[in-house]
Image (cartoon, rainbow, N blue to C red):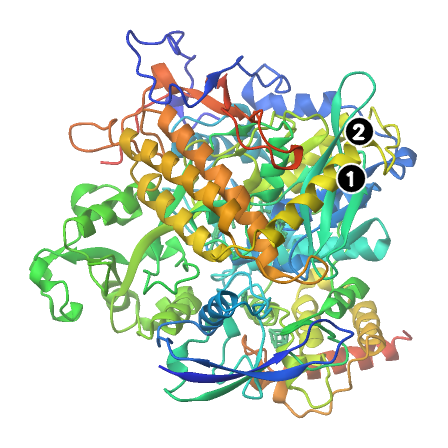
Amino acid sequence: MRVTLKIWRQPDAATAGAMHTYELDTVSPDMSFLEMLDVLNEQLNAAGEEPIAFDSDCREGICGMCGLMINGEPHGPEVTTTCQLHMRSFKDGDEITIEPWRSDAFPVVRDLCVDRGAFDRIIQSGGFISVNTGSAPEAHSIQVPKEAADRAFDAATCIGCGACVAACPNGSASLFMGAKITHLGELPQGQAERDNRVVSMVSQHDHEGFGGCTNIGECTAACPKEIPLDVISQMNRDLRKALQHGH
Amino acid sequence: MTDMPDTTTTSDPSYHVPAEGESDDAAGYYVPGEPIVDTKAPGGPIDERWSTRKFEARLVNPANRRKLSIIIVGTGLAGASAAATLGEAGYVVKSFCYQDSPRRAHSIAAQGGINAAKNYKEDGDSVHRLFYDTVKGGDYRSRESNVYRLAEVSTNIIDQCVAQGVPFAREYGGLLDNRSFGGVQVSRTFYARGQTGQQLLIGAYQALERQVQAGTVTTYTRHEMLELIVVDDGEGKKRARGIIARDMVTGAIETHLADVVVLASGGYGNVFYLSTNAMGSNVTASWRAHRKGAYMANPCYTQIHPTCIPVTGSHQSKLTLMSESLRNDGRIWVPKKKEDCDKDPRSIPEEDRDYYLERIYPSFGNLVPRDIASRAAKYQCDDGRGVGPEVDGVRRGVYLDFADAIARLGRDAIEEKYGNLFDMYARITGENPYEVPMRIYPAVHYVMGGLWVDYDLQSTIPGLFVTGEANFSDHGANRLGASALMQGLADGYFVLPHTIRDYLADGPFEKVAEDHPAVVEARESVQRRIEHYLTVNGTRSVDSYHRELGNIMWEYCGMERTEDGLKKAIDLIRTLRDDFHRNVKVLGSADSLNQSLEKAGRVADFLELGELMCIDALNRRESCGGHFRAESQTEDGEALRHDDLYAYVAAWEFTPEDAGESWATPMGTPVLHKEDLTYTAIEMKQRSYK
Ligand SMILES: Cc1cc2nc3c(=O)[nH]c(=O)nc-3n(C[C@H](O)[C@H](O)[C@H](O)COP(=O)(O)OP(=O)(O)OC[C@H]3O[C@@H](n4cnc5c(N)ncnc54)[C@H](O)[C@@H]3O)c2cc1C
Ligand code: SF4
Ligand code: FES
C-alpha cells in the first residue's frame, strides 16, 4: 500500500509547529499504525532527517501512552487505541493527517507527544481510597454485589489516554474524571471519601484549564475503552450531593 | 502445613561434589570467583524465618524518617507499591519512571491474574502448597527462604488491594472469584477480567499519588536513570547514594542524591528485540548498577510464553501475549498431515488433528508449564506442521481452539471470561476467534534472572535494593503464571519496607556533595556517552542493531541452547557491539526529546547483557526450567537437571577491560560467584509432567 502522511512537527513547546508531508509506499495491511510510523522513521533517519517523536509503550492498548489525532479523530477511525489500529483500516492511496492531542491542558512536548501531567494531578487531588499498607481488613470481610463490582470495573478500565479531552469541543476531562469517581464510588470501600473526592477532583480539573462539560458526548464516542457517558451523570449527582452535604 | 507430606526432607549432602571430568563449557569466557552467601536469611523453621527477620530488623524512629531519603527507580507494581508504603511511613521518597505517568509502567499489561494462598475454594491450598508449587515450578533453582516468604505474604496483598478498591472478579454472592492458572491444580488466582495488572497497578498508582499529595513522594516522570552513584563512606564501604537521570524532555542531566537507592526497573526481555514487554522496557538501570559492582544472577533464565500472537513480517515491533488463562478452555493442536497446514482449520476432521499436548502429557494436557508448551510448539513447527503465514519459509503457529469450550459452555460464558482477549486478537489479526481457531506461537515474556539480592533484597552494593522483575530471587529457573504480580507487590508493600529500615537505621548518612569526585565521574560518564552516540554519525539506525541482536539471541539463546550455538552467538554479539559503537546513526540533539538517543543508550547496554546471558547459558550445561540445553535431555527429549553440579545461583561480577576511556570501558571477562542452593523444607525432585 501507498499512503500520503501529513504530520505535525514541532521541535518543542516554545517553538511553533507546522504540518509536513511524507510519502510512504511500503505499507502492509498487517502493520499496526505505529509500525507504519516506525517504518517512516527508519526512512527519515536513513535520509538524515530527524525521526518523528510519538509516544507508545505497551503497544497492547492498555498503558494509555499512545494517542494521535488521525484524520481529526482521536485514535483514528476504529474504537481502539492508536497502537491497536492497523493499516488494514486504510486504503491504498489514502491521505492521512496525524496531529497531537489538542488541548490547553495538554501542552505539546515535541512533534506528536503531549504532556498529560494534569491527569496525574487530578488523581492526586482525591482519586484514591485512603488505606495505608498493612491496615487492610481481610478481603472477604468486604462483600460487593456483582452488579456494583461490574459497574465499578467498567469504569475502572479507563487507561488515562486523554482521547476524551482531545475529542471534546470544550476540552473537558469529565469522562476521565467521571470514570474514576464511578469506579471508587460504586464500591463500599470508596464511600467514606465519596463527597471529598468529587469536590477535590472537580476543582483540580477546573484549575488545570480543562473546559466544562455540555453533554455533547464526543468523549464517549472517541474513548477506546468505551467508558459510558453515564459516568458523567454519576459525577454530577455525586457533586450535587456533596454540595448538599455542605462541602 | 500438614497437607503436603512429601516435602520435608533434609538436603542431600552430596550436592556440589563436582563429577569426575566435569565439563566446563564456558572455560575461557569467565573467571571463577569466591562463593557468595546470603547472610540475611535467618535459619530455623522455614515458616518462622520471615517473622524472625522482621523482628530483628532495626526500627527507625518516626521523627528520623523525615531525614532519610529514598530514590525508587520504577513505578510498576514493585516500585509504586514501595514508594507509596515508604511515603506513608514518612520517608522522603523520589520516584522515577521513563513514561509520562507512573500509571503506565509495564505491569499495566499483565492480563491473567495474581496468586495468593487464600484457600477460598477449600481445594487444599495453603501457604505451604504455594511455596511448594513455586519452588517446583522454578525447577529447584530458587532460594527457599525467599519463596516461602512470598507465599506467606501473598494473602496480605489481596486484602490490601481490595481495600484500595481494586475491582477483582466476584461471584454472584459478592465474594471474590478465583481460577486455576498455568499448570496449577488449585484455584488460587485472583483476577480482574483480563486486565489484572492494570487494576493492581492503578491501585498502587493511586496510593502513590495520594502520597504525592501528602508531600512524602515526589514523582519524576519522563526521567531515565542512566547511572548509579556509588560513594565511599569514609570507612571503606562503598554505598549507593544516588543516580544520574536524564530529563527526557529537556535533556538536562540531573544528579539525585539519597540515603538509599531502590531499583524496581522491571525485566530485560527486550534484549530479544521482539518480546511481550513494552517498547521502552530496558536493562539500563540494572546494567549500570551491574557495571558499578552489583552482581547479575542467572541472566540466562528467560521465560518464553507459549501463547502469543505469531509474527507477521519484518515490520513487527513487539509481540502480543494472549493470557495463558486461555489454555484453561482452549485446546492446542496442529494438523497431523503437512499438506493440511494451509487448509481452513475447520475443514480438518478430528482424526487428522494432533492435540499434541494432550497426547504427550495426558495428566496435565494443555496446562503443562510454559517452557514445555513452548518447546512443544517449536518442535511441531520445526517438523513442518505449523500453521499460519510462512515467514522466512516456515509456518510458525499452532492452533488454540475454543470450538469445544463454546459448544460446552456457550459463547456467552466464553465471552464473559475472555471477551477482551478475543477482541484484541481479532483486532490484531483481522480474524474472529469465536469462529476460527486462534493461532499462537511462543515469545519472550519474562526474565527470571536479574540483579542478585540477599534475603533483604539488597544487592552486592550496600544501599542498593532491587525489587520486582529486576531482581532474581523468587522464581528460580522458571516462573509460575500469576506469580510476578504477586512478587512485585510482595516486595514493594510487605518486604522492602521492613528490610530497608534495617539499612536506614544506620543513617542518615553523611551528605554527599554534588562535586564529590564519584558524583562528577558518574555525571560526566553519562554526558560523554550521550556525546558519543550523537557524534558517531554512522550509517545504521539503532533499531537495526537491536533487531539483529534480537535475532541472534532468539536463534542461539532462545528456547533451545547448545554449546556451539552459544559460542557462535558470543562472537556475533561482540562483532555487532563493536560495529554499533563505530557505525550507529543517531540524529538530533542532546538537549531535547530525542527518542533515537534514548534507544541508543538502551541498545548499547543490551549488547553487553546479551553476551553475559550467553556466557551464563554456556556455563550451565543442564536443562532447568526455562533454560533448555540440548546436551542435557532424557532419552525422550525431556529437560534433564544436574543437581549434583548446578544447584547454585550463578552470580556474575562485572570486570572492566583495561583498555578504553573510563566512561566507555569495554566488558572484560566476568567473574562467576556461586551461591549454593540448599533445601531444608522441600525435597528436590526431577520434574515430570507426564
Ligand atoms: C504482556 C504481559 C502479561 C503479563 N501477565 C502477567 C500475569 O498475568 N500475572 C503475573 O503475575 N505476571 C504477568 N506478567 C509479568 C509481570 O507483569 C511483570 O513481571 C511485572 O509486572 C513487573 O513489574 P515491575 O514492577 O518489576 O516492573 P515494571 O512494571 O516493568 O516497571 C518498570 C518501571 O521501571 C521504570 N524504568 C525502567 N527503566 C528505567 C530507567 N532506566 N529509568 C527510569 N525508570 C525506569 C519504568 O518506567 C517502569 O515504571 C506479564 C508480563 C507481560 C509482558
Ligand atoms: S475516559 Fe476513555 S478516552 Fe478518556 S482517558 Fe479514559 S480511556 Fe481515554
Ligand atoms: S501504547 Fe500502550 S495503549 Fe497504546
| Residue B690, visible in the rendered structure | yes
How busy is the neighbourhood of tag 1: few (under 14 within 10 Å), some, or many (20 plus)?
Answer: many
Q: Position of residue B594 (x, y in %)?
A: 64, 61
* Left or right of B81 on screen, residue A43: left
Q: Earlier in the sequence, mark 1 or mark 2?
A: 1
The reply, left or right, for residue B436 in relation to residue B81 is left
Chain letter for mark 1? B
Circles 1 and 2, Cβ within 8 Å, touching? The answer is: yes
Q: Amino acid at mark 2?
A: Leu
Q: Which image quarter is the N terminus of chain A in?
A: bottom left
Q: Secondary structure at mark 1?
A: strand
Residue B106 sits above or below residue B612 on the image = below
Can see residue A143? Answer: no
Q: What amino acid type is highlighted by mark number 1?
A: Ile
**Where residue B526 sits in the image (x, y, percent)?**
69, 44
Residue bearing the label numbered 2: B504
The residue lying at 32 percent from left, 72 percent from top is B411
Q: Examine the rendered structure and indicate whether residue B378 appears above or below residue A200.
A: above
Q: Nearer the viewer, residue A18 or B79?
A: A18
Could you say which quadrant of the image residue A217 lies in? bottom right
Left or right: B105 as drawn, with respect to B221: left
At 32% across and 65% down in the image, what residue appears?
Answer: B312
Is the CB–ligand 1 distance for label 1 below 8 Å? no
- Residue B70's disc number: 1
Is the residue B679 above or below the residue A106 in the image?
A: above
